[in-house]
Amino acid sequence: MQGIKRTIDKNVPYLIDKIGYLINPFILNFKNENNHLLIFYFHGLYKSQKEKDLAHTDPQNNITVCQLAEFIDYFLNHNYHFLKPEDLLSDLRSDQAYVMITFDDGYFNNTLALDVLNKYKVPAAFFITTKNVIENKSFWWDIIYKYRTKDRISLEAIRKEQAHLKNFKYPYINQYIEENFGANSDGPWSDVDRPMNAAELKEVSRNPFISIGNHTHNHSILTNYNKEEIVEEFAISNKIILDITGKLPISTAFPNGNYNDLVLKTVEEMEFRFAFTTKNSINMLPIEGDKINYLNRFMAKPINVKRYVTFDRLGYNPRSLYFNLMKQRPSFKKK
């Protein structure tokens, strides 16, 4: 029985994906998307597939510059208007659908987006992990990925190792990296895996299409920390960003998407206007009030944009739809 259920759990979402790809565009012809805000988060960008094949960064659904252009072109052709966080503080049209691009972490390769953004005249938000920027150190998950991949360790084993470390604070992670990969293992291998430096971040922040946000100082998964430590993570990052760019961030994105009541309470006290999660859901406009707002985000994917964004525009994905339906079918939960 368990084997049958596993087969069903694997194959039905696959079928929903295939069917949805065909029928979603038809459904969208009749759906009112006004006042919808879809936010997508990206990590790294590659110039080409060759850069991805170098395996200098954990792919994390990273995309090529060409795929970013296709993503923007898709939404412009479907009459979406692109926003950055600051735009949410202004009055927005009620007869318009909106979309936002966000990049997490602060990779140098994110600067590859600038030519595309400038060409299409669309904005984006960059959420910066400041310690990596000021120390020019690779991100710890990339260190694990590139060294383990070089040693031909399986992706499944790499994912387990990364997931394990997410349960700890950054001092433990730093010690683990040094003990397992060497004292100099945090040095970038190329422009593909390095973070922006301070001068590059300053230059990026001058672009009128770019908003700079807080992604904590150490990329700390905040649910592992007490209140004082959470405050410190945000405060140090805010100060560094202010010193480099001359602007105090109004937005933050939770590393790994993790948050709890303590994190929410603390981030409100830090007086951010927007906090970005990784909850896959549509945001409804207008933004109400003058306090913090929590915004949902979909992950961008390294496939043809038409293969997945129709699901996001409808507010579901194949796996979530299937398992939500299964919750309503007790017979499937037996044994």
Image (tube, rainbow, N blue to C red):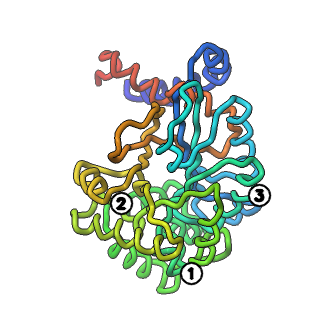
Residue under pointer 2: 221
| Mark 1 or mark 2, earlier in chain | 1
Q: Residue at x 68, y 35 (%)?
A: 75
| Front-lying residue, 185 or 307 | 307
Q: Is residue 4 above or below residue 287?
A: above
Q: Residue at x 24, y 52 (%)?
A: 265
Residue under pointer 1: 187
Q: Position of residue 334 (x, y in %)?
A: 29, 21
Question: Residue extending furthest bottom?
Answer: 183
Whole-angstrom CA distance, mark 1 to mark 2, is: 22 Å
Question: Residue extending furthest top?
Answer: 30
Q: Quadrant of residue 38?
A: top right
| Front-lying residue, 90 or 98 | 90
| Front-lying residue, 129 or 138 | 129
Q: Quadrant of residue 311?
A: top right
Instruction: State if disc 1 and disc 3 touch (CB < 8 Å).
Output: no
- SS at mark 3? loop
State left or right for residue 71 relative to residue 216: right
Whole-angstrom CA distance, mark 3 to mark 1, is: 23 Å
- SS at mark 2? loop
Q: Amino acid at mark 1?
A: Gly
Q: Residue at x 52, y 30 (%)?
A: 36
Q: Position of residue 97 (x, y in %)?
A: 58, 30
Instruction: State if disc 2 and disc 3 touch (CB < 8 Å).
Output: no
Q: Amino acid at mark 3?
A: Ser
- SS at mark 1? loop
Is residue 22 something that shows in the picture? Answer: yes
- Give residue 48's mark: 3
| Mark 3 or mark 2, earlier in chain | 3
Is residue 56 something that shows in the picture? Answer: no
Q: Quadrant of the N terminus?
A: top left
Circle count: 3
